[in-house]
Image: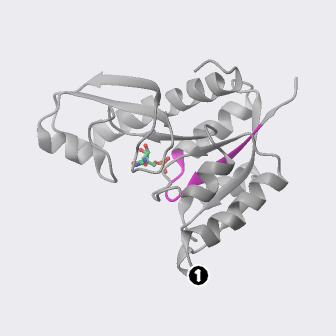
């Protein structure tokens, strides 16, 4: 069966990229990552992508006149590679209309909270500060708002300790499994 083509967009460490790459490699996902897009030249995700032999495109958004300008370049790269789905994996940037229109209902994101609570870049810390006891992870289709769009999957964990590092690791472990589950739903059109 033909493999689904994925692009992963990331800005940071790339543990979610790696989880997807490993699942593609060992057959848990019938897909291949044909492009890794990174808006932070020097980010750790680029080292991981090199190890997996994934083609990378690292760019500095400040070198483009507008979001439309760099997204037009990205859209062309995605089209040329026949990308089926774009997976945002710690891509800390709003996706604009150029990509959203071209890849309607084909861009998904993972976020370390039970959305719609705690959107933004500091979701885990914000939830801790709020006194939350049930933490979680959400995958969702992407719209033009921050961490917005229809939810696909969620995973949850009860945590009453006070070690944010331990909690972050537990949440990342859930993320890595949840993204694989969600990509399989996308491939099988079960959403
Ligand atoms: C992940 O926890 C992801 O859910 C989060 O960034 C982290 C990236 O980790 N994304 C967001 O907060 C989106 N608003 P990684 O680089 O190790 O995959």
Q: Would you say residue 10 sits in the magenta stretch?
A: yes
Position of residue 181 measured from the top left corner of the image (x, y, whole percent): 57, 23
Residue 8 sits above or below residue 73 on the image: above
Name of the residue lying farthest toward the right:
1
Which secondary structure lies at badge 1?
helix
The N terminus - image quarter: top right
The answer, for residue 121, to whether it is visible in the render is yes
Position of residue 54 measured from the top left corner of the image (x, y, whole percent): 75, 52
Its colouring scheme is: one colour
Q: Which residue shows up at 64% across the image and 39% down it?
A: 106
Q: Would you say residue 44 sits in the magenta stretch?
A: no
Position of residue 61 measured from the top left corner of the image (x, y, whole percent): 55, 73
Using residue 172 as the reference point, say whether residue 52 is left or right of it: right
Q: Which residue shows up at 54% across the image and 68% down it?
A: 40
**Quarter of image, res 128:** top left
**Quarter of image, res 23:** top right
What are the residue bounds of the magenta stretch? 5-15
Using residue 136 as the reference point, say whether residue 46 is left or right of it: right
The C terminus - image quarter: top right
The answer, for residue 47, to whether it is visible in the render is no
Residue 23 sits above or below residue 76 on the image: above
**Quarter of image, res 18:** top right
Using residue 190 as the reference point, say whether residue 130 is left or right of it: left
Q: Which residue shows up at 74% across the image and 25% down it?
A: 27
Q: Which residue is label 1 attached to?
A: 63
Position of residue 30 measured from the top left corner of the image (x, y, whole percent): 76, 27
Residue 41 sits above or below residue 113 on the image: below
Q: Which residue shows up at 43% across the image and 29% down it?
A: 174
In the image, 182 versus 19, the foreground residue is 182
In the image, 47 versus 128, the foreground residue is 128
Q: Residues within 10 Å of mark 1 (few under 14, many from 20)?
A: few
């Amino acid at each position: 069966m033909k493999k689904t083509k994925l692009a992963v967009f990331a800005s940071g460490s790339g543990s979610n990229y790696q989880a997807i790459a490993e699942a593609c490699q060992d057959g848990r996902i019938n897909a291949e990552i044909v492009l890794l897009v990174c808006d932070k030249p020097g980010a750790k995700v680029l080292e991981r992508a090199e190890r997996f032999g994934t083609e990378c495109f690292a760019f500095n958004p400040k070198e483009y006149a507008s979001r439309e300008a760099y997204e037009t370049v990205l859209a062309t790269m995605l089209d040329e590679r026949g990308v089926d789905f774009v997976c945002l994996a710690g891509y800390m940037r709003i996706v604009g209309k150029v990509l959203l229109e071209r890849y309607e209902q084909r861009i998904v994101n993972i976020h370390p909270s039970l959305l719609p609570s705690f959107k933004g870049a500091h979701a885990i810390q914000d939830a801790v500060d709020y006194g939350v006891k049930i933490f979680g992870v959400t995958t969702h289709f992407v719209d033009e708002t921050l961490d917005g769009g229809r939810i696909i999957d969620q995973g949850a964990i009860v945590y009453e300790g006070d070690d944010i590092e331990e909690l972050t690791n537990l949440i990342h472990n859930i993320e890595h499994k949840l993204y694989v589950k969600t990509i399989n739903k996308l491939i099988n059109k079960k959403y």
